[in-house]
Image: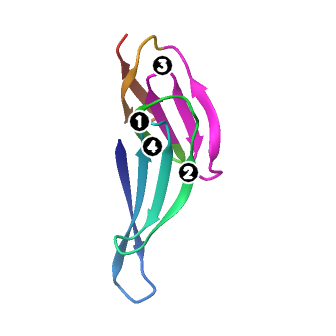
């Protein structure tokens, strides 16, 4: 599972518009990795191993990263503080997808 966010920034070299990428990766081993930079220069900004099972879906909204998977939980990570903020419960099946509309998060699961 991989998601990318793009942020355009003004370069100090003049009017050249650079695109900064944020790439968030989730693995079947339950690890989360984050990278930031340009296509020529990416650097790792976080690495979590929450040890809770395979990650099936990821989503970002504001400063938070949401990860869902086989354990029926949506884990919430604060990307500014680079730490876990909590979890959302309520599903009784593997979480398959996450979507955002304005200030709402919509999650879909096997239940």
Q: Is residue 62 above or below residue 19?
A: above
Q: Quadrant of residue 85?
A: top right
Towards the viewer: 28 or 36: 28
Q: Secondary structure at mark 1?
A: loop
Q: Earlier in the sequence, mark 1 or mark 3?
A: 1
Q: Position of residue 32 (x, y in %)?
A: 50, 44
Q: Earlier in the sequence, mark 3 or mark 4?
A: 4
Image quadrant holding the C terminus, namely top left
Query: In the rendered view, does 71 fall on the left or right side of 99?
Result: right
Q: Earlier in the sequence, mark 2 or mark 4?
A: 2
The label nearer to you, 2 versus 4, is 2
Task: Please give the residue where the numbered disc 1 appears in the rendered image.
Answer: 28
Task: Please give the residue where the numbered disc 4 appears in the rendered image.
Answer: 60
Q: Secondary structure at mark 4?
A: strand
Query: In the rendered view, does 28 fall on the left or right side of 46?
Result: left
* Start-end of magenta stretch: 65-90
Magenta highlight on residue 74: yes
Give me the C-alpha separation between circle 1 and circle 2.
14 Å
Q: Position of residue 7 (x, y in %)?
A: 40, 62
Task: Please give the residue where the numbered disc 2 appears in the rendered image.
Answer: 47
Task: Please give the residue where the numbered disc 3 appears in the rendered image.
Answer: 72
The label nearer to you, 1 versus 2, is 1
CB under 8 Å between callouts 2 and 4? Answer: no
Residue drawn where x is 56% and y is 54% of the image: 46
Towards the viewer: 7 or 40: 40
Query: Looking at this rendering, what residue extends furthest in the bottom direction?
Result: 13
Q: Secondary structure at mark 3?
A: loop
Image quadrant holding the N terminus, namely top left
Count of numbered marks: 4
Q: Earlier in the sequence, mark 1 or mark 2?
A: 1
Q: Main secondary structure of the magenta part?
A: strand
Give me the C-alpha separation between circle 3 and circle 4.
18 Å
């Amino acid at each position: 599972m991989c998601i990318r966010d793009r942020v355009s920034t003004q370069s100090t070299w003049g009017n050249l518009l650079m695109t900064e990428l944020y790439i968030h990766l989730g693995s079947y081993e339950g690890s989360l990795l984050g990278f930031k930079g340009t296509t020529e220069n990416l650097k790792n900004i976080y690495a979590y191993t929450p040890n809770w099972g395979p990650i099936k879906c990821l989503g970002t909204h504001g400063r938070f990263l949401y990860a869902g998977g086989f354990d029926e939980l949506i884990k919430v990570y604060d990307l500014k503080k680079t730490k876990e903020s909590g979890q959302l419960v309520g599903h009784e099946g593997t979480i398959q997808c996450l979507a955002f509309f304005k200030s709402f998060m919509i999650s879909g699961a096997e239940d």
